[in-house]
Image (tube, helix red, strand yellow):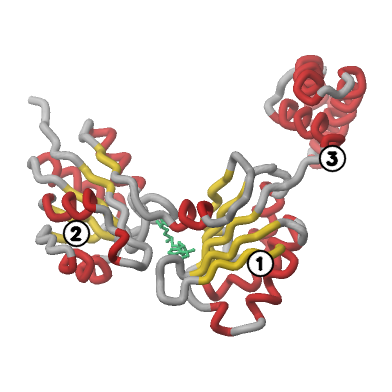
Amino acid sequence: MTIEYAPLYVVPTPLGNLADISERARDALRAVFWVAAEDTRHSAPLLRHIGAKARLLPAHAHNENAAAQRVLAILARGESVALISDAGTPGISDPGARIVAHAHAAGARVIPLPGPCAAVTALSAAGFSEAQWLFFGFLPARSGQRRAALKTIAALPCALAFYEAPHRILESLTDMAEELGETRALLIAREISKQFETLQRLLLGEAAAWIAADPMRQKGEFTLIVSGATVSPADEGERLLRLFLAENLPIKQASKLAATLSGHSKNALYAQALEIRRQRTEQRTEKLPAGYESKLLRRFAPRF
Ligand code: SAM
């Protein structure tokens, strides 16, 4: 016997201003039997405000698997569920992904509603011209790991979106300026849609001093949008070459593609590719015990 699951609605809720709830979100929250909420005490006033009478069940980061089982059992009884988080879109630096995954796996219909999301809202107000952007979410809490994470994305030419907690904003901005570069443009979007909403555009190198200048500027919720790394035309061939080599394309093909796309000399890029692969092999062999070196070289030899 196949089970007829009721649908799971994924419902964004306001970031700060209750008027930002959509008509569809309100209707869904009023219509469902159950609301799975990140913090039921936090969400109860919102549900009361819109006249939703659904039963609440907790679905937070620490019980997500158990909550997913419970949600599935409810859906299997034919009772619909709406998934919400404390604010914004569930699953975006918020719990929810596992519940959604379980619903998909069981064959239940997942119905996502468009709505508030701090990263998208901040991006819309950044005014940066990059066509691509990367949503990073929260950086690691410790400076060493945070800097390492920033290094991995420092060369990307797309805009970057981060979430940050108020008690880490100053040190994160300091690390960002050092790892991403002081001259990059930054939008600090603080307390979006709330009473003390602040949108400040400045350079990354100016940000820590701006935040430190007034204790009020360090309070509340922060979304940061950083402009992408600029690639000078002279570096474009090498940037593409490194990308293709990282994808393990053969050197000949990587240099040909990089030359076609950048307009740089194929022969020069081929020579550069040989050098990049040589350096990489050296780096790898340095870390291995002596006995492994020839084995490693043999393994990598066919690629040259
Ligand atoms: N799911 C949410 C969304 O769709 O935006 C994000 C949840 S995440 C746990 C919370 C973080 O989002 C905050 O620490 C802050 O970085 C960012 N955020 C949430 N509300 C915000 C607001 N009103 N203004 C600026 N950033 C906000």
Q: Nearer the viewer, residue 267 or 202?
A: 202
Instruction: Locate the C terminus and report the quarter of the image it occupies.
Output: top right
Q: Is residue 300 visible from the viewing direction of this image?
A: no
**Mark 3 sits on what residue?**
286
Judged from the image, the secondary structure of the residue bearing numbered disc 2 is strand
Residue 294 position in % (x across, y down)? 84, 26
- The mark found on residue 173 in the picture is 1
Q: Nearer the viewer, residue 286 or 1?
A: 1
Badge 3 density bin: few <14, some 14–19, many ≥20, Cα 10 Å? few
Position of residue 181 measured from the top left corner of the image (x, y, whole percent): 76, 57
Which label's residue is closer to the chain start, 3 or 2? 2
Q: Which mark is residue 202?
A: none
Q: Earlier in the sequence, mark 3 or mark 1?
A: 1
> In 3D space, how far apart are the residues under numbered discs 2 and 1 (Cα atoms)?
37 Å
Asked whether the viewer can see residue 71, the reply is yes
Left or right of 121 in this view: 60: left
Label pair 2/1, CB-CB below 8 angstroms:
no
Separation of residues labelled 3 and 1 (CA atoms): 35 Å
Q: Which residue is mark 2?
A: 57
Q: Is residue 26 above or below residue 72?
A: below
Residue appearing at x 19%, y 48% in the figure: 71
Secondary structure of the residue carrying tag 1 is helix
| Mark 1, other Cα within 10 Å: few <14 / some 14–19 / many ≥20 | many
Q: Residue at x 89, y 21 (%)?
A: 265
From mark 3 to mark 2, how far is it between C-alphas?
54 Å
Q: Quadrant of ligand 1?
A: bottom left
Quadrant position of the N terminus in the picture: top left
**Residue density around tag 2, few if under 14, some if 14–19, many if 20 or more, within 10 Å:** some
* Front of the two marks 2 and 1: 1
Amino acid at circle 3: Glu
Residue 116 figure quarter? bottom left
Give the amino acid type for the residue marked by disc 1 in the picture: Leu
